[in-house]
Image (cartoon, helix red, strand yellow):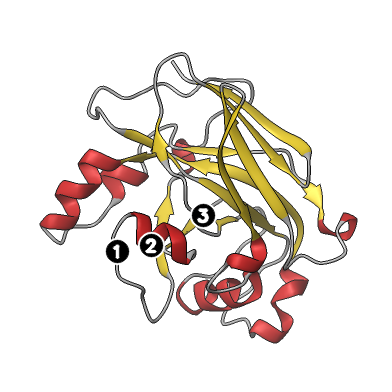
Amino acid sequence: MKVICIGRNYLKHIQELKNKKNDSPVIFLKPETSIIKKNQPFFIPDFSINIHHELEFLVKINRVGKSISAEFAHKYYDEISIGIDFTARDVQDKLKMSSLPWEKSKSFDGSALIGKWINKKKFKDISNINFHMTNNSKVVQNGNTSEMIWNIDELISEVSKFFTLKIGDVIFTGTPAGVAKVNEGDHLIGFMDGEELFKLKIK
C-alpha cells in the first residue's frame, strides 16, 4: 500500500507557515513503515527537537485507478477517517532552505497515524465534515473539509495522473491551521463529527 500525502491544502495553514499558495497540490509519499501500528505510541525520534502534529482528513482507495476524472473520483473510496502526519519541522526547514525533498522530515518510521475507518455513507455531505484534535484535553487543531483548497475528488484525480491508485492506498488530504510541537507525555485524541477515531500517546 501507499500513503499519499497532500501539502498546502488549507489557506490558514499556508499562512501560518508563511508558505506560498501553489497552483496545484503538493504531493509526497510515506512508506508503509511510516504507519504507527495499532495501540502503539509515537516515539519522538532522536534526529529532531521540533516534531509537529498535523491533523488530516483521510480517504482509503477501494479500487485500482489511473488518470481518474474528478467527476468519477467519488467511486474510488468508501471509507474515510482522520490521522496525523508527524513532521520534523526543524529538519524540514533545513531541507526547504536547500530546495531538497522533504522525505527525511515527513516519511520517517512511525510518522503516520491512521484512525478508525468510517463508511462515508454515514455522512450526508463529505464536503462539510468537522474534525478536531485535542492534546491533553485542550483542542489544538480543528478543520472542516469545506476549507480544502482542492476537494477530495480533485485530489484523487490529481494524484492518479502520476501514480496508479491501488486498493488500500491511503490519501492524507492536508492539514488545517494549528500545527504545533509535541512533547513526551502528550496525549492526542482525534474526533470526526464528535466521534473519537484515535488516541495516541507521545513518548
Q: Which residue is drawn at 76% across and 65% down?
A: 126
Mark 3 nearby-residue class (10 Å; few <14, some 14–19, many ≥20): many
- Secondary structure of residue under mark 2: helix
Three-letter residue code for mark 1:
Asn
Three-letter residue code for mark 3:
Pro
| Contact check, label 2 and label 3, Cβ < 8 Å | no
Residue receiving disc 3: 176
Q: Earlier in the sequence, mark 1 or mark 2?
A: 2
Q: In this view, does 38 lie above or below 95?
A: above
Q: Earlier in the sequence, mark 2 or mark 3?
A: 2
- Indicate the quadrant containing the C terminus: top left, top right, bottom left or bottom right: top left
| Contact check, label 1 and label 2, Cβ < 8 Å | yes
Residue receiving disc 1: 19
Mark sitting on residue 105: none
> Residue 75 is drawn in which quadrant?
bottom right
Q: Which of 81 and 19 is in front in this view?
A: 19
Q: Is residue 159 above or below residue 177?
A: below
Mark 1 nearby-residue class (10 Å; few <14, some 14–19, many ≥20): few
**Residue 19, horizontal then vertical, whole percent:** 29, 64
The residues bearing labels 1 and 2 have C-alpha atoms spaced at a distance of 5 Å
Q: Which of 102 and 10 is in front in this view?
A: 10
Residue receiving disc 2: 14
**Residue 142, horizontal then vertical, whole percent:** 60, 47
> Residue 59 is drawn in which quadrant?
bottom right
Three-letter residue code for mark 2:
Ile
